[in-house]
Every structure is written in structure tokens, then in C-alpha cells.
């Protein structure tokens, strides 16, 4: 299963014309359903509005490219209530006793469903190099706070 960082930068193609409509800049994540709900496309200039494609409008979903039926699938408003992938990186992962388990580095995403199956967690540079990063499955109770995630 790919990680969020592997999806960022992928091209989004228009199926009708076979041309690229943009590249994924960010993922929009619904923490209640543990689901990627939309892709934010990289903006062409500093005055442009965001370009967003909800996950249900994608015709194909990775792992090397995404496709849409046409440019009418692209919206210019970010859906409310979703967390940006870029905001998740660096959140503290805590257990119910308040013990820090590490820092969230990434999401592990199932394609084509968009379901987030796990969080990739770093316990420090040395541990990451020696043991690799851990993947904590998104099962059980998770409470999302502004500065961290509490697992039960």
C-alpha cells in the first residue's frame, strides 16, 4: 500500500483527452471515516484558486496516476471538515496514559478505496535508521486533537 508521500506529485489525467490536468499537491483526509476524501492539485500560479477533485470523481486511483472523466470534475473550493495531509505530519501519537509513541510521518493508503489503513510513525532518527519506521494500524479508538492523536 502506498504512503501519502508517494501519492503527492502523481499526475492526474483527463480520460477524454489524455492530457494532464495537474499533479497532486496534497491529500484531504477525513479522520472520522479514516478515508482520503479529495486530492488538491498543484496550483499553476500564485493568484489561482485551489483545484480539488473529490475521491468519488476519480475514474482510476493510482498507484502511478489518477484519472478523471473531464475537467468538470475539478472544483475550486476545499471541502470543509477535512484535514490536509501536510498537517498530519509531525503530530504526536500518544497512548491513553499520555505516553508518546512517536511522531506521525505519513498515512498508509489502500488504493483504489482511499481507506487509510495505518499511520507511519517515527521514534527518532537513530531508531528510524536502525529499525525503520513503525506502522500503527488505524483500528480501535483514535482521538484526533490539534497537536496530536490519542490511541486507545
Image: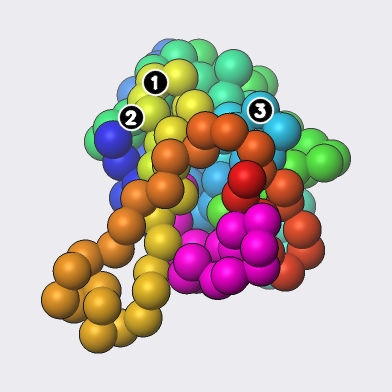
Closer to the camera: disc 1 or disc 3?
A: 3
Name the residue at 72% across, 69% down.
147
Near-viewer residue (44 or 114): 114
Farthest residue in the front direction? Answer: 97
Dot 2 corresponds to which residue?
62
Do tag 1 and tag 2 residues touch (Cβ < 8 Å)? yes
Q: Is residue 106 visible?
A: yes
- Asked if the magenta segment contains residue 114, the reply would be no
Image location of residue 21, percent across then percent down: 48, 37
**Spatial separation of the CA atoms under disc 1 and disc 3:** 16 Å
Image location of residue 33, percent across then percent down: 66, 28
Image location of residue 112, percent across then percent down: 39, 20
**Split into 4 quadrants, where in the image is the C terminus?**
top right
Q: Is residue 98 left or right of residue 134?
A: right
Q: Is residue 70 left or right of residue 121?
A: right
- Asked if the magenta segment contains residue 91, the reply would be yes
Amino acid at each position: 500500500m502506498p504512503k501519502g508521500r508517494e501519492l503527492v506529485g502523481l499526475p492526474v489525467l483527463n480520460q477524454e483527452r489524455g492530457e494532464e490536468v495537474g499533479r497532486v499537491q496534497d491529500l484531504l483526509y477525513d479522520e472520522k471515516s479514516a478515508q482520503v476524501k479529495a486530492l488538491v492539485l498543484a496550483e499553476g500560479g500564485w493568484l489561482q484558486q485551489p483545484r480539488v477533485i473529490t475521491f468519488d470523481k476519480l475514474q482510476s486511483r493510482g498507484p502511478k496516476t489518477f484519472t478523471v472523466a473531464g475537467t468538470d470534475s475539478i472544483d475550486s473550493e476545499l471541502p470543509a471538515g477535512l484535514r490536509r495531509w501536510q498537517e498530519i505530519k509531525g503530530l504526536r501519537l500518544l497512548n491513553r496514559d499520555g505516553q508518546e509513541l512517536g511522531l506521525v510521518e505519513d498515512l498508509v493508503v489502500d488504493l483504489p478505496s482511499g481507506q487509510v489503513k495505518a499511520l507511519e510513525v517515527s521514534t527518532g532518527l537513530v531508531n528510524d535508521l536502525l529499525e525503520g519506521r513503525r506502522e500503527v494500524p488505524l483500528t480501535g479508538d483514535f482521538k484526533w486533537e490539534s497537536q496530536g492523536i490519542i490511541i486507545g
